[in-house]
């Protein structure tokens, strides 16, 4: 039974007991810059803006594409797309959404004076043409695999922003999302559900703006904030281990150990496989990252629909040794030899990345335990980039920021960092550019993953983690990924503490 007001008695999730529910959610944010979704560099604001501003397409929990403002996304040829738009969408001020808003957003993102995290999304768009009020044509400068994924940036209301600067003409920026901004203050921004009734669980969201991380954690500890996000694995040093819940997911930083597959010895896949079994990633995660990173088996092993396999390889010293013995390597005087070849390699690492240096030392010690000699070469950024560019290394400890699309060409395509070439992988990467059927695509990715498991051109190590820290009073499914925190916000609810 509902009562008027923010605090209400409600039966939740078939619980026969009535509890007191609060329809306001307080989210803590530091380093606030702007609510303009194109110009903000604040990750917290970028997440919240997904509730306020819609994109042409959105990305699901398992990283599939689904239409949002777009009704139909058609690929005419390798570089040409026709996009049909939804015709019954309105901005928060009641103005109708049209193709003009899409062309306005794309053209402004391409301007030199506009700095935006979404600039790379449109850098290969050569022409955007408005066909009619609800149809646009996009012509690319070159073929972009999985281009649809690039269209996930927020769309602006063309009538609400100044053409040259993207400064908002209105006090409250407007979007087409489920929440709208109703109040902008120095230390608080208030959002309200656009269409809500007595069944709505979260009708109001308060963005509580704090000047520092210390202020943020203090407010969270005092129960003034319900919800914060962080990728800081040391959060327990500030908050302790009690009084809050933690939901974690794999984040975008993918760390891996790249082999030079053209190296005289490392060109042998059995040597690469032996090394992979000799590295204890769990131990490294525990010692270096407080066991708060996520072990990675593959670059798209972050929840993607296209990832199929499990446990590409596991730590197994005996298997590492047996692989070498079976392939003609002789262990003598603490060294593996095969003819004139010796298992000794240089491992390149940037000296200004303290954690990677520690990881390199641990890898060295682990490989040394089975007789593989590793010499760590610590270099500055300039020399490190030279090694990457020229691929004149044995092994290099490196990492990438993972894209939201499943394109694997960075890791396995032409000119990849590992100097790896496989004709079958090359053909599959080409084929999937023109495959729309998801089940066929999934099968193609399974083939790639099986080749990776057999060849081990590089060793996937781990992803960093994204943590949602929430007060026990916040209930519901808080599962998320690094693209979106709010997939399940409709079933969140907050209970009043007695």
Image (cartoon, rainbow, N blue to C red):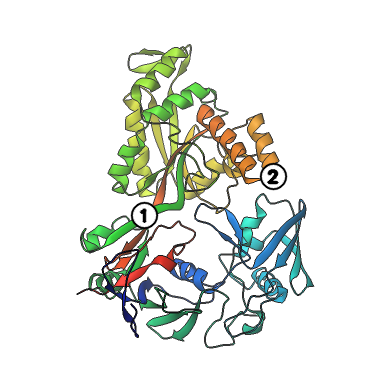
- Indicate which disc, 2 or 1, sits on the residue closer to the N terminus: 1
Query: Which sits in the foreground, 443 or 370?
Result: 443
User: Considering the image in quadrants, where does the C terminus appear?
Assistant: bottom left
Q: Is residue 453 left or right of residue 93?
A: left
The residue that appears at 42% across and 30% down in the rendered structure is: 276
Q: Look at mark 2 in the image and give the residue it sits on.
A: 435
Measure how far apart labels 2 and 1 are at the Cα level: 33 Å
- The residue shown at (56%, 88%) is 170
Task: Judge by depth and name the residue closer to the eye, 379 or 141.
Answer: 141
Q: Which mark is residue 248?
A: 1
Check the image and report above or below for 141 versus 458: below
What element does badge 1 sit on? Answer: strand
Q: Are the residues at dot 2 and dot 1 in contact (C-beta closer than 8 Å)?
A: no
Circle 1 residues within 10 Å: few <14, some 14–19, many ≥20? many
41, above or below 95, in the image: above
Q: Write the residue at 52% across / 24% down.
A: 269
Q: Which mark is residue 417?
A: none
Q: Residue 295 appears at what percent x and percent y?
A: 39, 42
In depth, the one of 448 and 4 nearer the eye is: 4
Vertically, is 367 above or below 125? above
Tell me if residue 264 can be seen.
Answer: yes
């Amino acid at each position: 039974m509902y009562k008027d007001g923010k605090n209400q008695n409600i039966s939740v999730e078939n619980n026969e007991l009535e509890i007191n529910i609060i329809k306001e959610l307080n989210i803590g944010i530091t380093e606030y810059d702007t609510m303009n979704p194109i110009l903000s560099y604040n990750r917290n604001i970028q997440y919240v803006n997904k509730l306020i501003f819609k994109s042409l397409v959105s990305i699901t929990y398992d990283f599939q594409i689904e239409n949002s403002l777009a009704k139909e996304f058609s690929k005419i040829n390798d570089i040409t797309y026709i996009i049909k738009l939804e015709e019954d969408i309105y901005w928060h001020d009641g103005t109708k959404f049209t193709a003009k808003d899409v062309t306005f957003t794309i053209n402004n993102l391409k301007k030199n004076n506009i700095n935006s995290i979404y600039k790379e999304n449109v850098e290969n768009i050569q022409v955007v043409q408005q066909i009619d009020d609800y149809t646009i044509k996009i012509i690319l400068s070159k073929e972009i695999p999985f281009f649809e994924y690039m269209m996930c940036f927020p769309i602006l209301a063309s009538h609400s922003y100044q053409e040259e600067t993207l400064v908002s003409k209105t006090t409250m920026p407007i979007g087409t999302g489920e929440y709208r901004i109703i109040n902008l203050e120095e230390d608080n921004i208030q959002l309200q559900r656009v269409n809500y009734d007595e069944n709505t669980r979260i009708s109001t969201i308060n963005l509580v703006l704090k000047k520092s991380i210390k202020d943020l954690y203090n407010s969270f500890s005092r129960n003034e904030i319900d919800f914060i996000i962080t990728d800081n694995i040391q959060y327990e040093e500030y908050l302790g281990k009690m009084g809050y819940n933690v939901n974690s997911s794999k984040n975008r930083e993918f760390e891996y150990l790249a082999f030079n597959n053209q190296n005289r010895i490392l060109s042998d896949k059995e040597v690469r496989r032996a090394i992979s079994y000799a590295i204890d990633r769990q131990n490294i995660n525990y010692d270096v990252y407080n066991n708060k990173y996520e072990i990675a088996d593959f670059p798209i092993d972050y929840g993607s629909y296209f990832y199929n396999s499990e446990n590409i390889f596991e730590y197994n010293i005996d298997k590492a040794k047996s692989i070498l013995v079976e392939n003609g390597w002789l262990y003598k005087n603490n060294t593996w030899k095969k003819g004139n070849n010796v298992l000794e390699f240089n491992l390149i690492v940037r000296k200004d990345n303290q954690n990677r240096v520690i990881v390199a030392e641990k890898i060295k010690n682990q490989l040394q335990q089975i007789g593989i000699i590793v010499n760590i070469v610590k270099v500055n950024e300039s020399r490190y980039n030279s090694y990457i560019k020229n691929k004149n290394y044995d092994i290099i400890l490196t990492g990438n920021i993972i894209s939201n699309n499943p394109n694997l060409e960075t890791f396995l395509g032409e000119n990849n960092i590992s100097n790896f070439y496989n004709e079958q992988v090359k053909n599959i990467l080409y084929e999937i550019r023109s495959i729309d059927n998801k089940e066929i695509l999934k099968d193609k990715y399974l083939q790639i993953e099986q080749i990776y498991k057999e060849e081990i051109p590089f060793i996937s190590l781990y992803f960093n983690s994204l943590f949602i820290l929430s007060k026990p009073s916040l209930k519901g499914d808080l599962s998320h990924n690094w693209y979106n925190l709010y997939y399940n916000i409709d079933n969140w609810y907050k209970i009043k503490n007695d």
